[in-house]
Amino acid sequence: MQMFANDPQYIVEDMLKGYAKAHSDIVAPTDNPRVFKTAQPVREGKVGIVTGGGSGHKPAFIGYVGRNMVDAVAVGEIFSSPTAVAFYDAIRAADHGNGVACLYGNYAGDNMNVKMAMEMAEDDDIEVKIVVANDDVASAPKENREKRRGVAGEIFMWKCAGAKAAMGGTLDEVIAAAQKAIDNCHSVGVGLSPCSLPAAGKPNFQIEEGTAEFGIGHHGEPGVEVCRLGTAKEIAEKMTKLVMDDISDKGNGELAVLVSGLGSTPVMELYVLYQEVEKILESNGFKVVFPLVGNYFTSLDMKGATVTLCQVDDEMKEYLNMEIDTVAWKQFQK
Amino acid sequence: MQMFANDPQYIVEDMLKGYAKAHSDIVAPTDNPRVFKTAQPVREGKVGIVTGGGSGHKPAFIGYVGRNMVDAVAVGEIFSSPTAVAFYDAIRAADHGNGVACLYGNYAGDNMNVKMAMEMAEDDDIEVKIVVANDDVASAPKENREKRRGVAGEIFMWKCAGAKAAMGGTLDEVIAAAQKAIDNCHSVGVGLSPCSLPAAGKPNFQIEEGTAEFGIGHHGEPGVEVCRLGTAKEIAEKMTKLVMDDISDKGNGELAVLVSGLGSTPVMELYVLYQEVEKILESNGFKVVFPLVGNYFTSLDMKGATVTLCQVDDEMKEYLNMEIDTVAWKQFQK
């Protein structure tokens, strides 16, 4: 496998070393080598924001640690959950006396480990509440939303909760902001090539030339169908229809839209896809008020993209426009 | 070829449509569809900063347009120079009465078209001065630096010049800042996989498994040798040695270091590479004071990376730390 790596078994280790060195102004190490916290000062009494998940999704999860967003992160091995202790240590690192919101994606390992971490935190009298992201439309029908996986919509959940906490929100208010953000998110992924686990050194599945895995998950979980790849317009229509149809109440019609690459997609192609998505949304009466295009949540070296629609109102727009300084997402106050 | 595209002949067109829609707060269209300018207010009398180049290097070049950096950009077809008229229109768009610094990479087409654009601008009494980036160490020996290609070091050239212009520098001062920045840059690229021109639909050369094209150019120009890929440590040693040895005067030993992916390299691997590069630099008496890791200057879907060392003094650190708001690079004031 063609990659920059030493021993692939320690690739997360090596990556974190590089990350900590390159971004010491934004993230700081903790006593637990798999837990990092914001290097920027946090106001005493601010509700803490924690996330975590498996590695291989760069810039998620660690890239969202920073001023006005995530306070501490638990880092897992490639595609596997951080340990309960890592989540617990992240919770302790993020605690400033008024509770911690732990905001993560709906995967069995993360659910289990966060639950254990919460029990440990309870013994320390740290109040922890959770929101479990479940924005991947293709992973379960609408009536079973609680079974859906969390994917790229998680970044809106962290952004809104981080803003609310920075504004002085209580734990319940921060949790409400996070829950509202993720409830408003509808995502779908399409894979054009498989990804390769570094330690395995070969693709973990196949995608035939000229086809796409429609509805693929962030770890290569099979999609709902293998479709013809077609043009950007055709694939954008298929993706956008699925997520638009998932919206029950159009509300004001305003959307934040994220088109994220899955790791090896040239950013040029993401813009080609974005302009088709936006056209379709506008012709259906939606208005994109907050667009994001780039590699915001990836799957190792998979080629492909996710499209996330996030319905926004004035409250959410205020959260989204708040200044943040993280590695993955820097936002100047508008 | 597995990609998100409509007619590959019009992929630049489609990409720019998406780009303009997604980033209307940062870039604005002009009458020339291949010229974009900053959407943010520019102070009358500020020296203008122009760049331009072929497409396929996202986020370069357009990604560096924005507050305190590049004022206008000329966009070429995939891997080919913008037209003379596009450079000329970009110069006009960036002119605010005190001249324009046109800062671009050393390629035959760009040199020719910028020269013609300057002649056109002369007729309009717009003073234009240029700096031609030539930081690619592998492309010519040190004594023929003027023959070297411009690669990822260009971003430091734009950053320093943009800052100097924002501070009220004259055209000569801005040009001096740009020249100093690029003179201080030493870059090398390594390719692990070829790239594919969208219209051709297949790789434009081959790289054998287990080998790397050492010294590869931004358009797949052959390197100085095909070497064994080896570990991240080994390839980092080879890359870092080449660029360190290109430094004549170590000065204060302080460096800005950019490790940029070439398009399809997972960012995780860039951090693995970065930590090895930093270790080698520090053991050789250098100190990294301004690290950048990510996809800052790419080559379509090529897998690989560039390493750029940029020697910095207090003046350059002030430029680098100045606040900028572009799509590719957002920097909060330190």
Image (cartoon, coloured by chain):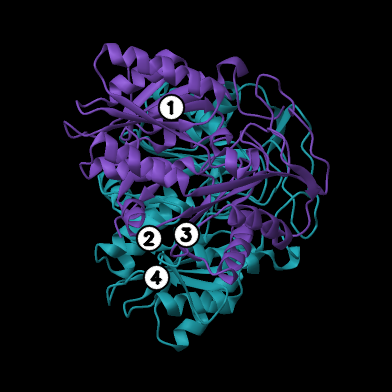
Chain colours: A cyan, B purple
* Residue type at tag 2: Met
Q: What residue appears at the point 43 percent right and 29 percent down from the top-left corner? A: B19
Up the image or down, B238 lies above or below A263; here it is below
Tell me whether marks 4 and 3 sit on the same chain.
Answer: no
- The quadrant in which the C terminus of chain A is found is top left
Tell me whether marks 1 and 2 sit on the same chain.
Answer: yes
Is label 4 in a helix, a strand or a loop?
loop
Is label 1 in a helix, a strand or a loop?
helix
User: Which residue has dot 4 on it?
Assistant: A39
Q: Are marks 1 and 2 in contact (CB under 8 Å)?
A: no
Which is more toward the observer, B304 or B177?
Answer: B177
The residue carrying pointer 2 sits among few (fewer than 14), some (14 to 19) or many (20 or more) residues within 10 Å by Cα, namely: many
Work out which residue is located at the far left of the displayed protein and give it.
Answer: B44
Q: How far apart are marks 4 and 3 (CA)?
A: 22 Å
Q: How far apart are marks 3 and 2 (CA)?
A: 30 Å
Q: Could you say which disc has been placed on residue B255 in the image?
A: 3
Is label 3 in a helix, a strand or a loop?
strand
Up the image or down, A238 lies above or below A74; here it is above
User: Which residue has dot 2 on it?
Assistant: A69
